[in-house]
Amino acid sequence: MNCSPELIKTITEIDILSPPQKHLTEILQAIGVNLGYCFGSVIEIDDQGKGYMVSSFNLPQDYSEQDSKIEAPILSGPAGEAVETGRILVLQHPLSDPRMAPWREFLQPYNIKTMVWVPLKNKGQVFGTYVLYDTRRRDVSEQELSMLEQMAVVISISRASNQYLDQLNHKTKELQQEITERKQAEILLNQHLEFIKLISEISSDFISLDTAKIDSAINKALELVSQFTRVERGYVFLLTNDKKRLVLTHEWCTQDVLAHKGILESIHVSDFEDFVNSLKRGEIAKVHSADIPRTPENKSMTDVLDLLEIKSFINIPIIVSNKFIGYIGFDATKKQTEWSDEVVNAFNLTGEIIGNTLERKWAEEEILFKNTLLETQKESSIDGILVVDGKKKVISYNKRFVEMWNIPDELLAAKDQKKLLVHALAQLEKPDEFKKKVEYLYAQKKEKSRDEIILKGGRVFDRYSTPLNSPTGKYFGRIWFFRDITERKMLEEKLMRQEKLAVLGQLAGGVGHELRNPLGAIKNSTYFLNMILENPEPEMKETLEILEKEVANSEKIITSLLDFALARPPLERKVNINDIIQKVLLGSNVPGNIQVESQIVKAIPTIMADPDQLVQVFGNIILNAIQAMPEGGLLSIKAKSPSPGRIAVSITDTGVGILEENLEKIFEPLFTTRAKGIGLGMAIAKTFVEGHGGSIQVQSEVGKGTTFTVKLPIGNKEEKPHERESQYFDR
Amino acid sequence: MKEKASILIVDDNMSQCKTMSFILKRKGYNVATADNGPEAIAIVKKSPFNIIFMDIKMPLMNGVETYKKIKKIRPEARVIMMTAYAVEDLIQEALKEGAYGIIYKPLDIPKVLAIVEKASKNKQGALVLVVDDEPITCTTLKSMLIEKDFKVAIAYTGEEAVATAKKKAFDIIFIDMKLPTLNGLETYLAIKKVNPEAVAVLMTGFRQEVADLVKEALNSNAYTCLYKPLNMSELLRLTSEILEKKRK
């Protein structure tokens, strides 16, 4: 039984070295065309026992589509029968055959009259079937059947080679895959090494970095990491002190993309609470812009993402000492990107390094700030400050300290506490006391202390000292503060004096007035007795004289008390100082053993003053001078005009002099060194002179004498020399 | 010989009262005493007195109040206030009311006797000119000075004052520094020419404003300057000081 020579010829012309799928189709086609079928297909059974079409010829275009819509499995029809029996199945009028019911409708248009299923076998097992379709009713001859069976062998072989090739292809692919993966691993390894190099480079950069350069170094690190991971943008946002905002602090981007700067520089925490909270929890945010729903509430965010052309971004929290301080972020703008663990790790490490570096920077800034603050406080203090360490070495001092103690440069350079102390002690009134105190305090590591120290020459320092103890009690040394309170002391003393004066004034006024009544009665009585006793016996007479004299004395005391207590403003009049001095000298009863020398410049200007008050002023001074010279001496009075608009009258005695410590007090009320007098004379003189806008000064040397100088303003604009103009009351 | 004056001494301090009355009695005056205001008023109602010494600070009724009442009963009596205290306001009030004078304790008896003499003589007083454009100052000063036996003329302008000074030789002239047309200084200088013996006392309520004028006037030998509001006892002290100096 021979095959059709045409068929053999056609088949032999097929290129069997072409891809199996191709020569399978060509073989099927050769069979179909040679035997006069309109179209055909090859069906195979897969591992699950389901049939599927692997090849076809001339099938109408929509055939496969239609076929796939039919729910019935291929093998449920005659194809299954052919496979099961392993014999060729020929079906006449398939459209009317119940086995073809599922396919009837779709085969209808093609008017198929005959269908033939030929099983395909391998090692005696059916593994599929090929199907031929004819629009004519044909009777399949035994010869044709035999030929179809022979062709089944050809198709099987073609199909097998096809499968072998598929397997081969699959193996090749697997092999290729393996090769690629190995290569990629190698690349990754390389990348990893490079990355480690990069990170160590960045971190070593930071370690040795001057804080001032940290910002530019962070930007550089962002650049390196971004380039390494092939992203277009890297940036850092940090939490503000009030924790209300996250602010863009560092950024790097490629030249062809926009920067955050100018577009998104700050984020309000309250606007993105969920985002910020997840960062705070240490979670990494990986977002693809395409995944964000384009809803109105997301619009502002998606607008920014679009503007920055962000396809994917990753934000990694920066957490330093368990505190969230901000985040580091990277943007991919070219394509949506899945971040590999390796890349995330790179980002994370960079964030950590930046966080630690920033922490260091802040700490250094804090220290710098504290140092600046301390230094400024120290230098702007009105106190002189000295700091001495636990080994008594001078570690710090300020300019004021140097000024206050007049410390020479070489002493400063020595930084030796002992030498400084010696220098200071030499300036003190009571060096031993201070030395003891200092030594005591250095021995006490807990004691604070304060007192006042008096320098030679009268300056007073408020001295305060406190140990330098850390909160844990470690002793670092001792700090000394010195404040010059000389002026304050003087003011205090002056105030006290004024207060004393005011009290005294009130008292004097009250007592003075109260005494005037009884004194008046005594005076009247004395007068009366004097008047009625025509020839009193001598003792009676003397008693009356004593009464009179002492009443007069009392009156004087009361008058001076009242003058002092209720000093009235001067009633100014044109006054010649010479006249005043002469009048005073006349009324002073200068003892014979005192020589008076009066040098008054002829051209001394007349002044505007209260003559009554001036008489009292000079009277009191001259009385003082006379009392200072019980053994006699020289009283010299000089008057001149030392500067325009002023006259100066000096009264000098050669008496006992006044102790230096009493010089200041001489003008204080109730101060007296004599048994006689209540100590108001000089106080009144001072009050009256100051009432005239003048001043009174005293110079004295014990054993040599005293000079009082009264300076008075002339009180008129034209300073004419005194003219001896005839004045009615001078006559 | 003319009959000696009758004197009333009013003082709550009995020692003062008694000793003073002893002296004055010995000097030949008729003396009565009272130790409080109401008593004094009762005595004055019964009989007249030429001179009354009145302590200012007294219980029940102070000296000034007592004086005001007595003035209504016996306007012709000369009342001299006495005080041991700095009761400036009361002193001022008394002087403005027309009290004859003020003396301070302890009393200077010769001075008291002189005052008594003076007050009882009703002698020809000194001539005083008051120059002020403020009528109130003029009349207050005038009535007060008249009480002290001064003869007082008033001028409201500088020109008027100069014209008045030409007619009579005044002893003391009080000149306000602020006057219309001629000011105080100009007035003083003009008067000085026609009335060289007159002593000028300046007055002003504007210490700062007229300071230069005052200085110049003082330089030209005006006596002194009093500042308003005027302290009447100061003014009286000055007038007697000036008159005493002139007498010498």
Image: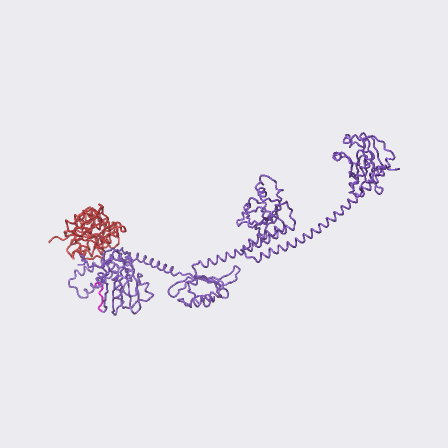
Chain colours: A purple, B red
Residue A339 place in picture, x, y as percent: 64, 48
> Total number of numbered labels?
0
* Quadrant in the rendering for residue B223: bottom left
Q: Quadrant of the N terminus of chain A?
A: top right
- Along the line of sight, which residue is nearer the eye, A510 or A243? A243
The answer to whether A185 is drawn above or below residue A627 in the figure is above
* Quadrant in the rendering for residue A451: bottom left
- Along the line of sight, which residue is nearer the eye, B191 or B18? B191
User: Would you say residue A528 sits in the magenta stretch?
Assistant: no
Q: In this rendering, does residue A70 appear at all?
A: no
Q: Is residue A507 left or right of residue A162?
A: left
Could you tell me which residue is drawn at 40 percent across and 60 percent down? A485
Determine the residue located farthest toward the left in the rendered image: B1
Q: Magenta part mainly helix, strand or loop? A: loop
Residue A43 place in picture, x, y as percent: 79, 38
Q: Quadrant of the C terminus of chain A?
A: bottom left
The answer to whether A500 is drawn above or below residue A82 in the figure is below
**Residue stretch in magenta:** A586-592
Could you tell me which residue is drawn at 28 percent across and 51 percent down? B208
Q: Is residue B97 left or right of residue A126?
A: left
Residue A478 place in picture, x, y as percent: 48, 63
